[in-house]
Image (cartoon, rainbow, N blue to C red):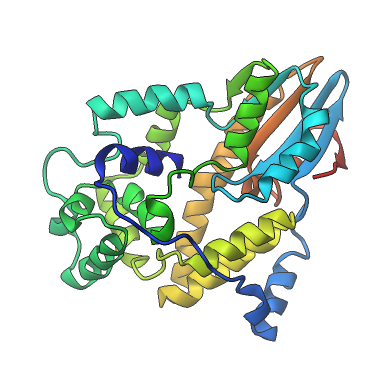
Amino acid sequence: MRFLFIFICLFVPLSAYAACEGRDLRPDLSAEMQDQIQQALVNFPYPEGNHWIATKDGATLHLIGTVHTNDARMDAVVERLEPTLSQADAFYFEVTKAEMDAFQKGLAEDLSPVLITSGPTLIDMIPAEQWETLSQGLADRGIPSWMGAKMRPWFLSMTLGVPPCMVHEPNASYGMDARLTDLAAEYDIPQFSLETTAELMAMFNEFPMEQQVQSLVRMADAFESSEDQLATMLNAYLEEKHGEILQFARLQGLETSGLTEEIFDEEWDGFEEQLLIGRNNNWMAHILDIQDQTAVIAVGAGHLGGEHGLLNLLEQAGYTLERGPF
């Protein structure tokens, strides 16, 4: 999402939008859907907790689940975490602010990582009906369809996943990770990246354009992210229920996509493999190298739980895990 806000701030004319005022959708879920979510969590390792402490030999790791979206309630969380995290020897983020700033500077000169800069654009590759749906989503966010047509398919998907009320909110991306970046800077604690922006771009663009377009077309009706979904996600995050929100997102996506469960699961599994599983495995190579120090590992909360989540991978690597205060 931070890539998206960088792009919009640089290249999209500003418009005025109302603040996000969504409501939590979970109380309205049917008993059947609530049961489905709970059943999916039965064998889901570490479904809750935004602060876990992993120890092995001389290493102590404070794993903090983050979101990249702003919510004023996070200020109190950081105040509670500050006495502990300020004693760390190092902070590890998905990508540090310094690397993001460098990426932003490079993007101003070369748009090819996120835009189609030569050859056919998406309007030439997507059927008219699906393009009309995608264009309406862009219009709701103040983005011209001609600009959306030049976006790489994965980037257009990210764009449509952000509610219109957030697109031009100046502090929209000041989430937990940004707050912890400021905390590390305040105490002059070294910051490191678990991946590079080049690795991220390579991951997003590893599939052929035709395959990306096919996936975009199949999921055209499921990318819309409402204010209600945003409110639901943030509430569940602050309740430390990252496993629940992941399952909620899957069921909501299936319901709105209009796809069969088989086809939707194929798409969902592909996203999960690309955005979660593969990255977690890559990050573990760096995390396991941390020796004889106390380190903060601040990554998206969705990366913590599950069979392929960081917590389960650390347990399998011999670390002792204890849930910490949040």
Front position in the image: 158 or 71: 71
The C terminus, quarter of image: top right
- Is 189 in front, or is 251? 189
Tell me if residue 20 comes above or below residue 9 in the rendering. Answer: below
Question: Depth check: 213 or 224 in front?
Answer: 224
Q: Quadrant of residue 78?
A: top right
Q: Is residue 214 left or right of residue 294?
A: left
Q: Residue at the location (69% across, 31% down)?
A: 297
Give the residue drawn at x 63%, y 21%.
185
Residue 227: x and y in percent read 49, 66
**Residue 309 in view in this figure:** no
Instruction: State the count of labels.
Output: 0
Question: What residue occupies the far bottom of the structure in this picture?
Answer: 31
x and y percent of residue 321 in the render?
A: 86, 39
Residue 322 appears in the figure: yes
Where, by quadrant of the figure, is residue 304 drawn? top right
Q: Residue at x 50, y 60 (%)?
A: 268
Q: Is residue 301 left or right of residue 217?
A: right
